[in-house]
Image (tube, rainbow, N blue to C red):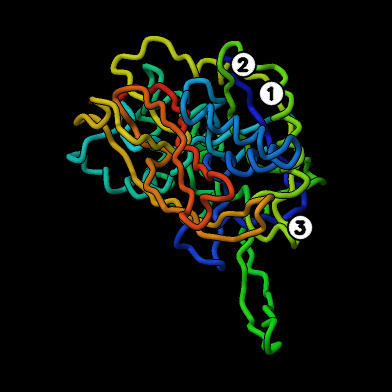
Amino acid sequence: MCCKLVRLNFGRNFAHFGELGIGLEQTSERVRSDTLFSGWISAYAKLFGKQEAGKLLKGYEQHPELAFRLSSTFIYRRKGNRYTYYLPRPLVLPKGYPGSSEEDDLEFAKVYKKLNYLPLKIWHRWYQTDESFTEDDRDELISKAKARTEKEIDKGDLYHTGTFDYSKSFKFDLVPKIAVDRTNRGTNFYHTGFVKFHREPEKDEDAGLYFLVSFPHLFDQKLEHNLKISLELLGEEGIGGERSSGAGRFDTEWLDLDQLWTDILKPSNLINPHYCLISLYWEKSLPNGLLRESACYEIMARGGWIASPFSGRQLRRQSIRMFAEGSVFPILPQGELADVTPKEFKANHSIYRSGISVSLPINRSE
């Protein structure tokens, strides 16, 4: 299986990544795997036709093991030639994390729980190596909990790897909008939330999103090339909401994995291997053993609107519940495509939501 890292550089562009239930005034800072898959396939259909896209999806519905796999997008941050990639923190504690009986546990537990995303180096150490969570990590989190300013933090490995800098990679803004009624010309004033990624050219710093994509062995080279072209089109048109305002446009950069990424995908000497999702996951019939006692997971509802390039109609797609990123399972989850075509849309073409998953092996603490 060939795995690539793809960086999405939004430059000065804003983006609106809405999710079910958060409203127009709020936006996420990233795109989940099902939304990325839908946008990518929609761009593929525009370039190569409705029939080709339908044939591709039908094949993946019947044989998900032949499909290319996408992680969700996550934040990256660049300073000069140094890149920091963030991954979702697994929903299980790392080995070495103090038990609840520790007197100072409450001093840093709140800080730990706020670390929803970890730099690659820390993620790897905590969940895939023998070193795991250390006394120095505990002391640094206690220091972070007590500090009133950044200067008071003990600047150890967590600080220097960017563990506390995730929220500095982007900011949210509210932009005023006016909707005009087509019938009576009445106006309605509202706000839409946008995310803008950190960018300081004078300091040679910026941030954006990245994702992992893996192609099965003997994957069609022509199809892979066409998918790359389709992603370029998606970048020109934009991903997410408010695209008519120019939001969501990006440039792409395809990269081979470096040694740290290779070690993360194939770690050695795992004692109690489990699998942490870095994408959404859905399967009509869950495999036996997936939800054993050692599993730890979060379920979220996924809905949204259909934006078909062929029908011109806007309809709500069927809502389904999926396992979220960071969920941990004792066996490797595979996933499949979910048919979420509304009844009113059956005559046009099928609509799918991708539950085909990507996960990383980790050590599960006892």
Tell me: residue 3, above or below residue 161. Answer: above
Kindly identify the residue that appears in the image at 62 percent across and 16 percent down.
Answer: 219
The Cα–Cα distance between marks 2 and 1, rounded to whole angstroms, is 8 Å
The Cα–Cα distance between marks 1 and 3, rounded to whole angstroms, is 29 Å
Query: Left or right of 68: which side holds 125?
Result: left
Query: Left or right of 181: which side holds 200?
Result: right
Identify the residue under disc 3: 246
Front-lying residue, 284 or 69: 284
- Closer to the N terminus: mark 3 or mark 2? 2
Callout 2: SS: loop
- Which corner quadrant of the image does residue 332 belong to? top left
The quadrant of the rendering that contains the N terminus is top right
Kindly identify the residue that appears in the image at 47 percent across and 54 percent down.
Answer: 342
- Tell me the tag on residue 219: 2
Residue 130: x percent and y percent? 36, 16
Which amino acid type corresponds to the residue marked 2 in the rendered image?
Phe
- Which corner quadrant of the image does residue 207 belong to? top right
